[in-house]
Amino acid sequence: MLFHVRMDVLLPVDMPQDVANDIKAREKAYFQQLQREGKWRHIWRVVGEYSNFSIFDVAGNTELHDLLSSLPLFPYMRIAVTPLCRHPSSLHEDDR
Amino acid sequence: MLFHVRMDVLLPVDMPQDVANDIKAREKAYFQQLQREGKWRHIWRVVGEYSNFSIFDVAGNTELHDLLSSLPLFPYMRIAVTPLCRHPSSLHEDDR
Amino acid sequence: MLFHVRMDVLLPVDMPQDVANDIKAREKAYFQQLQREGKWRHIWRVVGEYSNFSIFDVAGNTELHDLLSSLPLFPYMRIAVTPLCRHPSSLHEDDR
Amino acid sequence: MLFHVRMDVLLPVDMPQDVANDIKAREKAYFQQLQREGKWRHIWRVVGEYSNFSIFDVAGNTELHDLLSSLPLFPYMRIAVTPLCRHPSSLHEDDR
Amino acid sequence: MLFHVRMDVLLPVDMPQDVANDIKAREKAYFQQLQREGKWRHIWRVVGEYSNFSIFDVAGNTELHDLLSSLPLFPYMRIAVTPLCRHPSSLHEDDR
Amino acid sequence: MLFHVRMDVLLPVDMPQDVANDIKAREKAYFQQLQREGKWRHIWRVVGEYSNFSIFDVAGNTELHDLLSSLPLFPYMRIAVTPLCRHPSSLHEDDR
Amino acid sequence: MLFHVRMDVLLPVDMPQDVANDIKAREKAYFQQLQREGKWRHIWRVVGEYSNFSIFDVAGNTELHDLLSSLPLFPYMRIAVTPLCRHPSSLHEDDR
Amino acid sequence: MLFHVRMDVLLPVDMPQDVANDIKAREKAYFQQLQREGKWRHIWRVVGEYSNFSIFDVAGNTELHDLLSSLPLFPYMRIAVTPLCRHPSSLHEDDR
Amino acid sequence: MLFHVRMDVLLPVDMPQDVANDIKAREKAYFQQLQREGKWRHIWRVVGEYSNFSIFDVAGNTELHDLLSSLPLFPYMRIAVTPLCRHPSSLHEDDR
Amino acid sequence: MLFHVRMDVLLPVDMPQDVANDIKAREKAYFQQLQREGKWRHIWRVVGEYSNFSIFDVAGNTELHDLLSSLPLFPYMRIAVTPLCRHPSSLHEDDR
């Protein structure tokens, strides 16, 4: 099941660099694991912002919430989730 | 080059059915041609709305504007374009 | 799977009464069928508005979109969908 | 009498963990008591956010304000209340 | 039980004068009946707008919705309802 | 002359309790004096928020600004003022 | 007593030219009368919009509402009123 | 003197094609005259919208308003004007 | 050349009183100098807010920016500038 | 390829002056280098705000993101990017 997610990262400007680096390193590890598992299907940077648009492919609402709220950056992000479905005129078999 | 596009279709509720059908048929034909050419790379329906999120893969800003403004539904849509770029931690070689 | 849906009905003020009545009668029949099937699990009127908050219990995003876009009032509604999940501290076994 | 309530929790990111845990433990105890009393009739998590949609069933406006402003998380929440009423076409006798 | 209601009247600018007058006459009659019954407790015009702030004193949410949706101007108004309760420091016994 | 005022109190969550209590005690004393003088004619709590809707009856704009900016909570409030006038169809002689 | 008023004129694009001209001629006559009486103290055009910022100097809220709602363009305007008072550091005796 | 102007064109979808064409032809002629005179210094299309960002270089506010309100498309546009000034670190002598 | 300026002062609530007083004293001196020079032509307090509406009469955009950004309160204000021009039906010769 | 960028600088009011000066000095150096390279093609100050409108001329989305996220002020700015294209009626050969 597909979901569109916009994430805006709002790290406090006075967060010590090593604390920020540690959070980002754990975020990256977890994020790449979810990519390998096929759950975090797409991610793109928004030009000029510390934000991304992502597509998740998960079993349902609960799995998505569990994934998102486990992100190390979760307490520092504004997140907006939009449920998606396949477009009837899409030619791409795998347009998930 | 990748762009995120949200399209909201706002057809007048009193548009005659055959006029609407004609516009939609031409839209579908053009839309599938752009899919085949690899320019309209992804499209997903927004659940509960007459709207979609799409990803375009084009040579640049001008090509994107030409494609969008040639859509038969263009006069009836609200369109929002966001330029994207590859995320540095993405594992997908083809995450275009 | 649960979804929170807000629907705002925006019938044109100059729609002939019999046209409006026909749409509403078909809406009511379909709506009650979905209630009987357990898919439209809750509905409440918003006080002072021609709007409702509803809870849908469906197999997934696609089923929800199919149900909503089949509503006779769909072309006249503004709809906002929010995916839900069970709250970890809820005591109600059936708080679906 | 039914009310729709959206709660967004906005804990300061630098709140000490034990202070946060204490507030959350007291919140949970009070919240479950209100569930048992039938006043906090439904609660659902909003996917991807530290937020919930709830349905309260109380004697009136004053009781609702007293319940909400007594929540241990009250000083850290943005709350929006919408009064509800039964939908005339609802088939559920107990759609409170 | 008290409710704060803001009403914005949005009559179409091309509504025939006699139709508008008929609606307004019926609105006034109903409005004054509700005042006499003590249910429409206060009303004030917003300076420079075709709008009012009102205070209703009713048995509950359902009665308020029934009153508002029966207003002859209801199809032409944007209405926002806010539930109120007595302020603990108010000195006015009857500050309903 | 009547004015509608919405006040939202935004005390910092880390304000020491005794400082907050002192401000609130002075606010209450001043507020009750203005009630006794007939200037703060109505006040109602907004359910679920640390906010109120009030009606002031003052000689004019300047007096209202002087009263509001003298409130001990003034530096911690967001205030919105709307000038009112009597509604022509009001039956209440004293609907001030 | 001073009030800041923003007016945005929203004439329907299909209004016949002579109807528009008649409304504007009556508006101008009434507007200049109010200027002569000292009640419409200032008016400035907003560059690039069919809008103005104005300062009214009237006896109070009711007079202002009567003036504004009598404007021939009133049914075609969005109006926002803000009550003003003299600034304590102003050097202009007549900064009304 | 420089001004940033955003123009959104909102032609009614049911405007006859020849009427639209006539307006656009006159708009283009006037627009190119202003370019030649150096007053409409820059114009760029917003990708995916019937909108532009422009830079005007005029003697002052009044000249700008006269130019904009003389545009044949003026009654069909939403226009937002922002006054600009030279940036102190700009290296371009002619960054007007 | 005339400009409409709205200023909202947002002093941090924990700024030491003597620091605030010093800034305000310098603001007042500079503000009164600009009044004497005829550049800060009007100022009015917004009732109930720490805000003002002002009219500046300056040589152009650059002078206005220089004046505003030199205000001692500038780092603590949200400022919105709107260019104005004379209204064609104004009777006041000096309605600058 | 052209992009319109609005930047709003939001330096914390309590940032030490020398820290702010260091950031601004590095920002200026980098900014002037980008001007010399022809990538930061235009910049204008927004009157009354610590903001600018800029036009970038870059190879594509990725280069723009790299430039913007390398700005020393990047962590302290709100940035909005809009892709542009040449207007078909523009007479300026170089209206990039």
Image: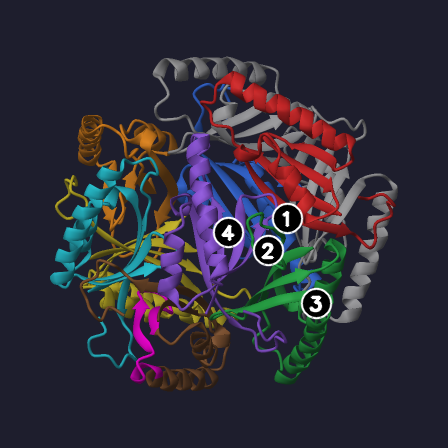
Chain colours: B red, D blue, E orange, F yellow, G cyan, H purple, I brown, J green
Q: Is residue H59 left or right of residue F87?
A: right
- Residue I38 included in the magenta stretch of the image: yes
Residue under label 3, please give it: J38
Stretch in magenta: I34-56
What is the secondary structure assignment of the residue under circle 2? loop
Parent chain of label 4: D
Marks 1/4: CA distance? 19 Å
Point out the image quarter for the N terminus of chain J: bottom right
Total residue callouts: 4
Q: Quadrant of residue H22?
A: top left
Spot occupied by residue H10 in the image (x, y as percentages of width and height): 46, 41
Q: Dots 1 and 2: beta carbons under 8 Å?
A: yes
Question: Mark 3 or mark 4: which is in front?
Answer: 3
Q: Dots 1 and 3: beta carbons under 8 Å?
A: no
Counting other residues with Cα less than 10 Å from the Cα at mark 2, is it few (<14), some (14-19), or many (20 or more)?
some
Rendered image: mark on residue F4? none
Residue under label 4, please give it: D70
Parent chain of label 2: D
Q: Is residue H77 visible?
A: yes
Q: Quadrant of residue E53?
A: top left
Q: Dots 4 and 2: beta carbons under 8 Å?
A: no
Residue under label 2, please give it: D10
What is the secondary structure assignment of the residue under circle 4? loop
Residue under label 1, please give it: D50
Q: Amino acid at mark 4?
A: Ser
